[in-house]
Structures are given as structure tokens and as C-alpha cells.
Amino acid sequence: MSKFHTTEVSEFCLEGKLLDFVIKDGYNLKGLLLQTTDGECYVKLAKHLRASFDLRLPPGTWLQVVGEKKHDQKTGEVKLKAQRVMAASPDAATLRHKDLHRENVSVSSSSNAKPKKATILVCQKSDCMKRGGTGVCQALEAAVSARGLESEVTIKGTGCMKNCKAGPNLVMPDKTRYSRIKATQVPALMDKHFGGDSVENEQDHESKVTCLSQAEC
């Protein structure tokens, strides 16, 4: 019998709730993990989407994804590749949410049970790492631990933020972006965003914050 056409290619359009980004090698964005009415679903992003995708998009955001579906008729494996990703309409998102809740989807119940963590995004591309990104990550982890914020704050490495020459780059939970950050500036940055009670000279603290703000260029 003929061996061709073992893979069926078609278009797909689905809506789902963003669970997480799928990142390879610590910084390469590859795709999205979505919760749909049929369960969890991995969607690979086309190259043009990976370069421009907003990694600050919070988990729980409803998305509509359009792209190409490949179905291997021999193995039954299905692969999805997104060509367009858009915000889902509020009405559709509400209906989908009701469906998921009715089916007792675990991700919905867990999100109700636990408060959402604030996420600090840190670029882990090689250029940022060479400019001191490793030290910044270590300083952030130490600052979170020292302030007892482990249950409230998480630090997440991301792909390139498209500002390599001004690295290290990071984005705070309120979407404030900082560049050229040094490890020694991290305590002041944490105090600014999380209301630290550090005992330091007020004038010195203000000067550190000013320095951080000017670094955002």
C-alpha cells in the first residue's frame, strides 16, 4: 500500500486558559501550555510569535489560538503550531470557565485555593548573564528569602527581552522594567516594590531607588 499521506494537516482554532510558558534551555520560549475543555494542551509557537510574545502575560488569561494541526495517522500523535494568538472574547471566556468549573478541572480548584504568586521575570539570555545576570538572580533569591516572601514571590527566567546591550534586564510584578541592574541594587529594588523594613538611611535608600529608575533606559 502507499506510504504517503500518513500525516494529515489541517487548520485549528481553539480557546483556552494560559497555564504557563514552555521554555527550553532556561531562556528559549517554545510554546504555551493551555487548559481547554478537553484538558491540558501544548501549543508550539511559530518563530515569528516567539520573538515578540509578551512573557508578562499572567497565567489564567484566556487566549484564542489559530494555527496548523498535524495528525500522524500512523501513531495518532497530534501536534499544534500557533500562527496567531489573540485574547479570547469575554463572553466566550466566561462560558468556557463555567464548563471547566463544572468538570472540576484541577487547575481551577487549585487557583482558588492558593493565592497567586507575584512573579519577577529575569532575562536569562547569554548577553544578560555575561553582564551580571547570574549575580542578580542570586541576589533576588537571597532578598526574597530574607524578607520571608517565598510563598508570595517567585523568580522566573525568561527568553530574550530584546534589550541585550542594556542587560541585565528584569520585569517586576507590576510590569515595571529595569535594565543594567547590579546585584548590589537588588535590596533597594525589593524594598521599593515589596515595602521592605530595612534599617538604612532614608536618603541613601532614595538615592538607590533613583539610580534604579535611571537604569531603565
Image: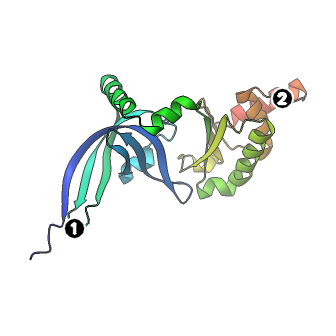
Q: Residue at x 54, y 50 (%)?
A: 160
Position in image of residue 201 (x %, y %): 90, 27
Q: What residue type is labelled 2?
A: His
Position of 96 with respect to 178 (left or right) is left
Residue 6 lies, with reference to residue 43, above or below; the image says: below
Position in image of residue 15 (x %, y %): 32, 37
Q: Dividing the picture into quarters, in which one does residue 62 lie? A: top left
Q: Residue at x 64, y 41 (%)?
A: 154
- Which image quarter is the C terminus in? top right
Q: Dividing the picture into quarters, in which one does residue 215 lie? A: top right
The secondary element bearing badge 1 is classed as loop
User: Could you say which is closer to the camera, residue 3 or residue 122?
Assistant: 3
Position in image of residue 121 (x %, y %): 60, 42
Q: Residue at x 56, y 30 (%)?
A: 113
Task: Return the mark for residue 171.
Answer: none
Q: How crowded is mark 1: few (under 14 residues within 10 Å), some or many (20 or more)?
A: few
User: Could you say which is closer to the camera, residue 89 or residue 189?
Assistant: 89
User: Could you say which is closer to the camera, residue 134 or residue 58?
Assistant: 58
Whether residue 105 can be seen here: yes
Q: Name the residue under label 2.
A: 205
Q: Which amino acid does label 1 sit on?
A: Lys
The secondary element bearing badge 2 is classed as helix
Q: Name the residue under label 1.
A: 74
Position of 129 with respect to 160 (left or right) is right
User: Could you say which is closer to the camera, residue 110 or residue 55?
Assistant: 110
